[in-house]
Amino acid sequence: MSREESFDKIGRPAHVCLRCEAGFDDGDIFHSAIFRGEEGFVRQDFCGACWGELEEVPLAVWKSRRADSEPPPPPPPDGALLLELLGRLVQEAKREDEAFVYLLALYLMRRKVVVLESTEGEGEERQLRLGPGRGFDDVQLSIRERRFTGEEMDRAEVECERLISGEVGANSA
Ligand SMILES: [Zn+2]
């Protein structure tokens, strides 16, 4: 699957609670969260009851209402969830996340969740300054655009694909 194809899949919540496996009906409120898993970032959806029992603190959370009558899936909840994840990872500033953060930022730019306001610096110091897209909470983020190794990029692409395709690992419970 190409990066473009996998990015296009993101607007698809699981529509089932990962813990109790209850399905979400039209109009139901459900919670989406992104966790740092053993093999990368994972996105999980939960019903209200199970949400209250989470032991692990997610990196990013978002509350959605399942849209009446399915397609087309609206991008805003996922955009907001991923924007929160991006903000959190920028704040944590871990070097091993930088390639993933960069790819996620490109994806969110493409989805107009964020807009590129300016660039600063050169080479290894280059930073992308991002602001909010229309309809999203005010954010100001600086994304490092250094030279990533092939290995870093490969790993980041796999993580992005897993997150965006909604593929989740074993239940974290
Ligand atoms: Zn549940």
Image: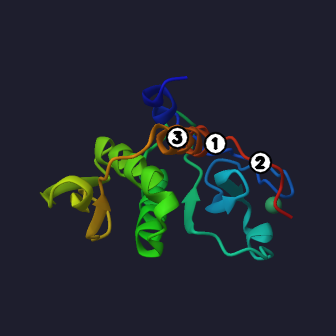
> Quarter of the image containing the N terminus?
top right
Residue tagged 3: 151
Q: Secondary structure at mark 3?
A: helix
Instruction: Name the front one of labels 1 and 2.
Output: 2
Image position, residue 76 (x, y; %): 41, 52
Q: Is residue 32 visible?
A: no
The secondary structure type at the circle numbered 1 is: loop
Q: Quadrant of ligand 1?
A: bottom right
Q: Earlier in the sequence, mark 1 or mark 3?
A: 3
Foreground residue among 161 and 9: 161
- CA distance for labels 1 and 3: 23 Å
Residue 91 versus residue 142 in the image, above or below? below
Residue behind mark 1: 166
Residue type indicated by callout 1: Gly
Quarter occupied by residue 165:
top right
- Look at the image and tell me whether residue 107 can be seen: yes
